Structures are given as C-alpha cells and as structure tokens.
Image (cartoon, rainbow, N blue to C red):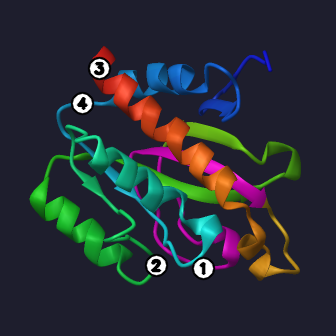
C-alpha cells in the first residue's frame, strides 16, 4: 500500500494499514501536543467495536506515556461516566488541552481509516446517543459502516481491526512525544 494520506480542511486521514500511518499521524499530533495535553480515550471493552479508545489508553499506560491518560480497559470512560470523567480531568488539569480518542462509524469505504481533526468528538452519535462534544482535538478510528437500520452492527467488528488501529494510534502518540 503506497497511498498518500488525505489532508482535508479540518485535519488528516490515513488508513491504519499504510506503511507510514503512525509517522504521518505523529507529525500532526506533534504540532498539537503541549505540556497541558491530556489524552481522553472514550469507549468500553464490553463491545469490540467500541474498545478502540480504552485499548489505546491501555497501550499508552503500559508504555509509561508521559502525559495524563484517562480511559483504559481497566478504567474505561464511557457513556455512563463520561461527564464525571470530564469534570475530573478539568479539576485535575484546569488548563488542559484534551485530545479525545474514540471509535466511530462512517462510510464503508473509510473503514480502517484514522482521522485527526480540530474540535471535539461526539461519543455515541453513531449509535443514536446524545452526549456532549468532548475534546479540543479528535483522534477517531472508523471501525464500521453506518447502518441506520441496525444499531447492533457494531457488535460484528473484528478484534484484530480494533487492535491494529489502536496500535497505530498509540505508536503515533509515542512518536509525537519523542519528536517534540
């Protein structure tokens, strides 16, 4: 695969299987990460398709990532505790720049792509939940296609896709902090 990543007005998008995906994403993250950065990984391990965020959080914690990380497999940040978790982040890191990581649904031809864009994520939007936007910068992985007729479609996603995407995102964060 030697496809070039796509820059678009709000950020960058690259398929996780591209040879240089972590490096491309790290260059974007490097420009955004500051000493006030906090990584907020949203999702739950109770649904494979929604485990991208907590898996990234766990991978970063296992590597002793130097910035605060919220949302891991052991302590996920999800729909039920999202607002409480955001308040905790804001109380512990009052001037934080929140980088939110989450899985999302999208067009079928974009499955496997990772997007970094300015602005918040909207957790649960793809499955009909109405939660507030979270974050100053978004890192999202498209894990499945949007299917308006079947909200349970997200339960048919392969764990290998989620793990591989999480690995690229975690690698990008690690590279970005070593490059800054």
x then y, percent, for residue 93: 14, 53
Front residue of this view, candidates 52 and 59 = 59
Left or right of residue 104, residue 121 in this image: left
- Above or below, 179 relative to 43: above
Which numbered marker is on residue 129?
1
What is the CA distance from the residue labelled 3 to the residue labelled 1? 37 Å
- Relative to 114, is 122 on the left or the right? left
Residue 34: image tag: 4
Quarter of the rendering occupied by the N terminus: top right
Q: Which residue is labeled 3 in the image? A: 178
Say which label, 2 or 1, has the lower sequence index. 2
Q: Is residue 179 above or below residue 114?
A: above
Q: Secondary structure at mark 4?
A: loop
Which tag is nearer the camera, tag 3 or tag 1? Answer: 3
Report the front residue among 114 and 126: 114
* Highlighted range, magenta: 119-144
Q: How far apart, in angstroms, are the residues tagged by discs 1 and 4?
A: 31 Å
Q: Quadrant of residue 13?
A: top right
Q: Earlier in the sequence, mark 4 or mark 2?
A: 4
Q: Which residue is tagged 2?
A: 79
Label 1's element? loop
Q: Are marks 1 and 4 in contact (CB under 8 Å)?
A: no
Which residue: 58% across, 67% down?
50
The stretch drawn in magenta includes residue 112: no
Q: Is residue 143 magenta?
A: yes
Q: Nearer the viewer, mark 2 or mark 1?
A: 2
């Amino acid at each position: 695969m030697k496809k070039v990543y796509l820059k678009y007005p709000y950020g960058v998008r690259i398929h996780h299987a591209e040879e240089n995906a972590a490096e491309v994403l790290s260059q974007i993250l490097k420009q955004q990460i500051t000493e006030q950065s906090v990584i907020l990984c949203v999702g739950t391990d109770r649904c494979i398709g929604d485990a991208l965020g907590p898996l990234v959080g766990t991978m970063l914690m296992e590597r002793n990532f130097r910035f605060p990380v919220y949302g891991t497999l052991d302590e996920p940040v999800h729909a039920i505790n999202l607002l409480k978790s955001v308040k905790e982040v804001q109380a512990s890191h009052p001037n934080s720049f929140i980088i939110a990581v989450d899985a999302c649904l999208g067009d079928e031809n974009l499955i496997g792509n990772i997007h970094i864009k300015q602005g918040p994520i909207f957790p649960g939007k793809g499955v009909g939940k109405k939660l507030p936007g979270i974050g100053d910068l978004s890192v999202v992985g498209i894990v499945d296609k949007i299917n308006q007729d079947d909200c349970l479609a997200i339960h048919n996603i392969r764990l290998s896709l989620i793990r591989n995407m999480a690995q690229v995102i975690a690698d990008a964060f690690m590279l970005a902090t070593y490059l800054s």
